[in-house]
Image (spheres, rainbow, N blue to C red):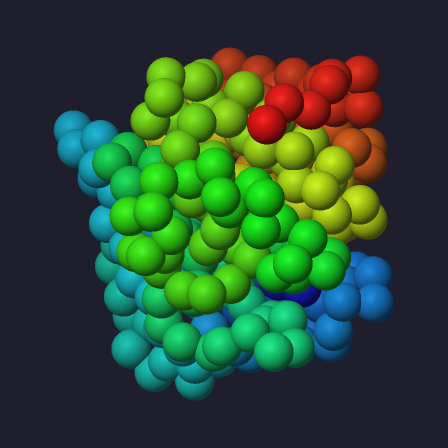
Amino acid sequence: MCRHLAYLGPPIPLAALLFDAPHALARQSFAPRDMRGGGSVNADGFGLGWYREGDPVPLRYRRDCPIWTDAALPALAAATVSAAALGAVRNATTGMPTMETAAAPFTEGRFLFSHNGRIIGWPESVTGLAGTLPVRDLLTLDAPTDAALLWALVRHRLRGGASTVDAVGETVLAVEAAAPGSRLNVLLNDGSTVVATAWTHSLSVLRRPDAVLIASEPFDDDPGWRPVPDRHLVVATTAGVTLTDLSERTATA
């Protein structure tokens, strides 16, 4: 499995998310608290995406090494300030490649995407879903991994005009129908709204007066952290957080 996070709020250094908090993402990479049987460390790459003021298209930084081995990252993170960001550290599923392009976030246009989990029966279980994508999308996947395919499925719905909520929710339900028991925690950030799912894996939300944080695990002991119930979809902005029970929705192809 992996660990990931998303932030919306006043501009802050990325180091606040990656290094400064007692259980920030860098620490979660080697000392996760709630992997739920999905490995023990997240050392197979990492990635960051963030937005600059006035620019809807995010920047991205990815590597295929453990986050703690990148000597340049602490200074970069301390000097980079953003009001919206997404970060992830990767624990590769057995048999899947360790390469820079396999690390989240995946991106197109204004979107940043991350997957924490595993598609059961990969790849046979989802060949039918993969077949609904344009051939070009399959030939240009970031990597031959379940996370990259999941992003391609979400992206295809977005390109077709689906809302971020529908693109994420319908994709998760379709993959679960094809591959029951999969772990499908995802984050989709467009710079102003984060859509996330908790699907058989841990996810928590911290709501502050002017900010919101969504993470696989709480960064600290702030009593404001709240676990997201399983099989729920989260829509978060700086104005508020709403939860929807995905088990009440019907899967569509």
Query: How many discs appear?
Result: 0
User: Is 224 drawn above or below residue 59 in the view shown?
Assistant: above
Please identify the quadrant where the C terminus is shown: top right
Q: Nearer the viewer, residue 234 or 68?
A: 234
Q: Split into 4 quadrants, where in the image is the N terminus?
A: bottom right
Query: At x 61% / y 60%, what residue is drawn?
Result: 123
Q: Position of residue 23 (x, y in %)?
A: 64, 61
Q: Is residue 59 left or right of residue 28?
A: left
Q: In this orientation, does residue 156 appear? A: yes
Specify the quadrant of the image occupied by residue 100.
bottom left
Q: Position of residue 131 (x, y in %)?
A: 49, 43
The residue depicted at 33 percent of the width and 26 percent of the height is 159
Q: Is 152 positioned to the left or the right of 221 in the image?
A: left
- Rendered location of residue 46, percent (x, y): 45, 67
Q: Is residue 66 above or below residue 121?
A: below
What is the residue that sits farthest to the left in this orientation?
A: 54
> Residue drawn at (36%, 66%), measured in percent from left and top?
101
Quadrant of the image occupied by residue 61: bottom left
Q: Is residue 42 visible?
A: no
Q: Position of residue 127 (x, y in %)?
A: 58, 51
User: Does residue 57 appear to the left or right of 115 in the view shown?
Assistant: left
